[in-house]
Amino acid sequence: MELPSIVPFLENKTVLVTGATGFLAKILVEKILRIQPNVKKLFLLLRAADTKSATQRLQNEVTGMELFRVLREKWGESFNSFISDKVTVIPGDISSEDLGVKDPNLMQEMLKEVDLLVNLAATTNFDERYDVALGINTMGAKHVLDFAKKCPKIKMLLHVSTAYVCGERKGLIQENPFSMGETLNGVSGLDVFAEKKLADENLVELQSKEVADQTITSAMKELGIQRAKMYGWPNTYVFTKAMGEMLIAQLKENIPVVILRPTIITSTYKEPFPGWVEGVRTIDSLAVAYGKGRLTCFIGDPDSTIDAIPADMVVNSIIAAMAAHCSEPCHIIYQVGSSLRNPLKYKAVQDYGLCHFTKHPWINKDGKPVKVGKLTVFSTMASFQRYMAYRYILPLKGLKLAAFCHIFKEKYSNLNRKIESVMRLIELYKPYLFFHGIFDDTNTEKLRMAVRETGAEEDAFYFDPRCIDWEDYFVNTHLPGLVQHVLK
């Protein structure tokens, strides 16, 4: 694989980024603007009613954030004019044809100018409404591809998926594309367009009954989980992302396509500064609950591997892949993770959490430090269910018997709701708490080698997980970053 010098590659290029207010997209935009100020234009597509509200979102949720601190310091008083010159915000929605762009002049400018298209728009909720997840993760991928086909200057489409489209496979998971209609459990009959029709029909039927919005949402969420499990996927998110990959593979024609599958994305390792993170992401929800003293037990195999990768490494792999495959016919998969080259164990993450929050306890609303202890770990679902039965479900039954009293009735309802919520979350996360797959990254390693061969750029476009000291990263970078940027 021959790789051109990456920074000069970006010069005078026009890049369209979808999902521009998302975690990864912001880091990608900041990186491009910081390393190559002579990029021609960044079109940033985000959901908004009009250009004015889109511009407001850009300022509030992207360029105005601390993530852009280094770039802001570099440009000083010229920062806003630099952003105005290089960035054009596009109100739109990838779940619609033509990306939901309503301004015909803006549409023509995009079609004429775009060289590179990076699709980062997604809904990552495991149990998203089926119609919503299909619209964004599946049909959205098709709409982005359709748009790319209309761009005469297009040099490549890079679509960001997820490594967990593999479902609950064990062992070494290859960087293989999906064929149309392929399922994880061998059940035949998966038709992507029929799934879309089914979701639409269910939605119309529910709306015709004039039921409450919450009822519609619950029913559409349940439909998504049901359809996913029917074909072997554990949740709606990974099922709809897999179908998005299928559509791209089937319909790409002569468009150069890269599908990038990151694993669990964590805070920045190094750039633009260590530890930047936004929102409570997968494993971070456990860390937050633990640090605040709300999590005293944990379910999962302590010896299983958790595949984490810092966000800036994912962004570096995106930029390197764009440079490597620009203008050449391709359909290549890159799995970007750490489980093969530098595995991280669940039990190690627990130890890192104990170490950090013991040294730097969370201060609660009363101004008192929260004391944390070692977690009780349930290594099987059966042991966890026994604990729940003894600790919560038996007392709940007692409350139910006493529920004729108004006070006990309220307590019963609250506790019952909490238990149902916990059990639903456990059911959603179970495939990842007991995950025993290792992600092959042969293609990604070849890309890393190509970057190394460019010489000086290896330091700027690092994405080798072998350089990570996990204990140092979690204790001194990731967990402090989580406290500073998310729990502030």
Image: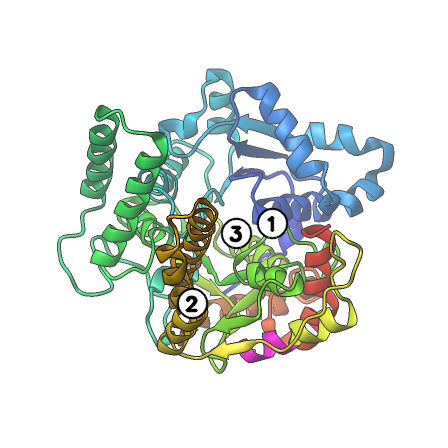
- x%, y% of residue 215? 31, 36
Secondary structure under the numbered disc 2 in the rendered image: helix
- Amino acid bearing label 3: Met
**Magenta stretch, residue numbers:** 345-351
- Tag 3 or tag 1, which sits nearer the N-term? 1
Q: Which residue is mark 3?
A: 322
Residue type, numbered disc 2: Tyr
Q: CA distance from mark 1 to mark 3?
A: 27 Å
In space, the residues marked 3 and 2 are separated at their CA atoms by: 30 Å
Residue depicted at 23% across the width and 45% down the height: 192
First along the sequence among labels 3 and 2: 3
Q: CA distance from mark 1 to mark 2?
A: 19 Å
Residue that lies at the very extreme toward the left in this rendered image? 189
Count residues near mark 3 (Cα–Cα under 10 Å), then give few for <14, some for 14-19, many for 20+.
many
Residue holding disc 1 = 279
Residue pictured at 42% horizontal, 51% vertical: 417
Task: From the top left corner, tell me how far across and down residue 292 is, in percent.
Answer: 66, 61
Asked which quadrant contains residue 163, the reply is bottom left
Taking the magenta stretch, the answer to whether it contains residue 215 is: no
Q: Which mark is residue 164?
A: none
- Residue 356 lies left or right of residue 231; in this view the side is right
Residue 387's place in the image compared with 96, above or below, is: below
Q: Nearer the viewer, mark 1 or mark 3?
A: 1
Earlier residue among tags 1 and 2? 1
Q: Nearer the viewer, residue 79 or 367?
A: 367
Q: Is residue 396 left or right of residue 252?
A: right
Q: Are marks 3 and 2 in contact (CB under 8 Å)?
A: no
